[in-house]
Amino acid sequence: MKPLEGIRVIEVYGPDAALALRLAGSLTGRILADLGAQVSFGEPPEGDVLRRVPPFTAGGGSATFAFLSAGKHAIRLPDDPAQLIAAHDGAIIDAGGFARWCGQAALPAMAVLSMASHGAHASEFTVLALSGVLDIVGDPEREPLRLGGHQAAYSAGLSAFTGLLAALCLARAGAGAPRTVHVNLLDTLLWINWKSVIAGQVAANSPSRQGRAAEWQVLGCADGWLALVYQATDWPALCDLVGDPRLHEERFATVAARRENGRELAALIEAGLSHHTRDEIRSLALARRLPLGPVWSPAELLQDRHYLSRGVFFPAIMPEGAAGMMPSLPVVWNGARFAPGPVPALATVQHA
Amino acid sequence: MRKPLEGCRIVDFGIITAGAATSALLADLGADVIKVESPTYRDPFRAWSSDSMSLEGGPECPAFFRSNNRGKRGISIDLKQPRGREAALRLVGRSHVVLDNFSRGVLERLGLDAETMRRANPDIILLSISGQGAAGPDAKQISYGSTLEAVGGLAWLTGYAGGPPVVSGRDLNYPDQIVSLFAAGVVLAAWLQRQGVGMGGAALDVCQRELTSFLVGEAFLAAEEGEAPARSGNAVPEFAVQGCYRSGDGLWVAVTVEEAALHALGALLGTAEDAALATLDAALAAWMSGADAATRVAALSASGIAAAAVRSGGDLAAGGAPSWDHAFGVTPEGALIKALPFRIDPAPFTMARDAPAVGQHTAAVLHEIAGYEEAEILDMAARGIIECREG
């Protein structure tokens, strides 16, 4: 039996909901559906906006929609969905939809999504800027750089997942009227970027992007790239692996000295590892207990032996048939994985 | 107000951020979290700080450690000694959840494998957080956050157009932050199921590498085409224009322009009706440099275009108008502390309990929960099996 079996959740978005909020709420719903909840979302006659969001699968459908909607039910909403929302155990909604429809009726446990607790029109990208996350990534000589994909929306989706489950636990414990959980992208990103903010309060120089001088960064190797990642305790093993006697010079002798001379250090390590392939780096890192990471593309990861042995990938079952593989929920529960359900066809039936 | 995890006791072997921040979040949600350290092993985070920070808050509780461990009680037991291990198992017997993020094999070597813990408590929820998962050919691979960005596919998708992959690096260490947002929810799901059907007993293997991949899940479906989406800097296909532009006062301003707002942008910049995107991009860059960031952000916002100056950690801490609603709280002495990723109670976050010193609650926890008499506790302390601190 799946942990959330018997729990009914609905996703509803107001007509003006930002794309980021739909992405966030849809990820929350996808996780709940995998865990066994019955998750429905409202879909207009012309199709959910996510059906048009890139990237696309070989068959031409939206990979984003397929990934986020697997296992859910697409339904046609009535003009005023308040009663329908109230008939569920939990709901995911944007703040605009909440203000529009959830004024009076008794409500279930709700996760209400917004871009920020206050402020003007925003996108995932501008919220990354406000949170300081943008400032951390990239080269100091160039513009700040966003993380790939939809990290601002999806991390808020994770936040809403935990928040909504907390509200559902309260409801099941019979702790009074169901609670509303407020989730916004900016607070979630600030929570994620907490070290910068706290360091910013107590230190003269808060962290900022360091590019080629960073302690942890991506270096080139024989057939691609690897992430150089290490702690002070890994330094002797790293020197041994790279095998360049210059690493033992005074300028790299302490953590502070290595930070001071980060560019030279990165160049030496890159030169020392450049003849290795990523597969060799993987084996060497494993044997020497070093946290180096070969950079794999999603296409390569679909063939990754570790992922294959863990059964990470499942096919996306589209209405017209299987269309590629996608990662399942990142938890093994009593030895088993949660297989994602089929991707819903366009909603055609008005909800009864 | 009642909290969601009231009545839930957690034996917490979580360290650094991935584990310790997960149990801190569960403590905020009402769980009784008991942080377990040892006379011979401390949470390494007690000794960590950022590059330029001293160990604020004293040598045992620097600011970073405090944020990930407030709300918990702390005990110190030597699990390598039989009586220490016995005490830990007694605690497991009287708890509901055991959480760890040690390297795979550490708990097993200490004689605290899943089977032994289940014998001590058949209903125990075991949450194991690890970089690569509990099993598989790379399970023993040592990983920190940015390692997982590389091996999970996120680094491949992050970078300047035409440039190499990029990781978030040591100061952000993104995968170590997001895992708590997921793993705490996984514990709540197991707790909810237990409330519903009255059975506990779950073994939960949360893999940080897989979470990193999950958060770029659509890229795997698109990858079947034969080519993964290329790195595109800050541009995204969903929006007509997106990038950072340097203002007259030297700040970077992030701007996102939807297709529908192109007309408004053109009006602001004075470009031709049918200007190409590259022309708009160049005009926007020139326009941005003509005034300070605040002026330009205000003008873009007034035109319905999303824009914000890029802020650093220092900018955020310095404040002005508060940027957050619930992400940070303030300690009694005025220091910022990480608070909550979401808000469930109307009341502002308060730190119910400061992070514990090593062994601060050993005596109280062993007496009240594990049922040890004072004489036994004193004897174990004298033999170095446990550490007790006046608290």
Image (cartoon, coloured by chain):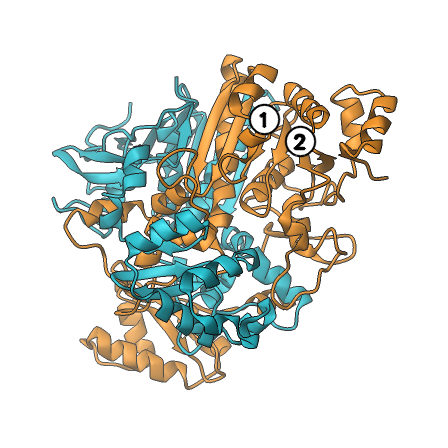
Chain colours: A cyan, B orange
Q: Quadrant of residue B285?
A: bottom left
Q: Is residue A284 visible?
A: yes
Q: Quadrant of residue B266?
A: bottom left
Relative to B261, residue B117 above or below:
above
Residue at 52% in and 56% down: A234
- Helix, strand or loop for disc 1: loop
Q: Nearer the viewer, residue B304 or A137?
A: A137
Quadrant the C terminus of chain A occupies: top left
Say if labels 2 and 1 share a chain: yes
Kindly identify which numbered label has been placed on residue B111.
1
Tag 2 near tag 1, CB within 8 Å: yes
Decide if residue A105 is in sight here. no
Residue, x 30% and y 56% (percent of image)? A278
Quadrant of the rendering where the N terminus of chain A is positioned: top left
* Disc 2/disc 1 C-alpha distance (Å): 8 Å
The image shows residue B228, relative to residue B241, as above or below, that is above
Give the x, y percent position of residue A140: 45, 75
Residue B188 screen position, x and y as percent: 52, 29
Identify the residue under disc 2: B79
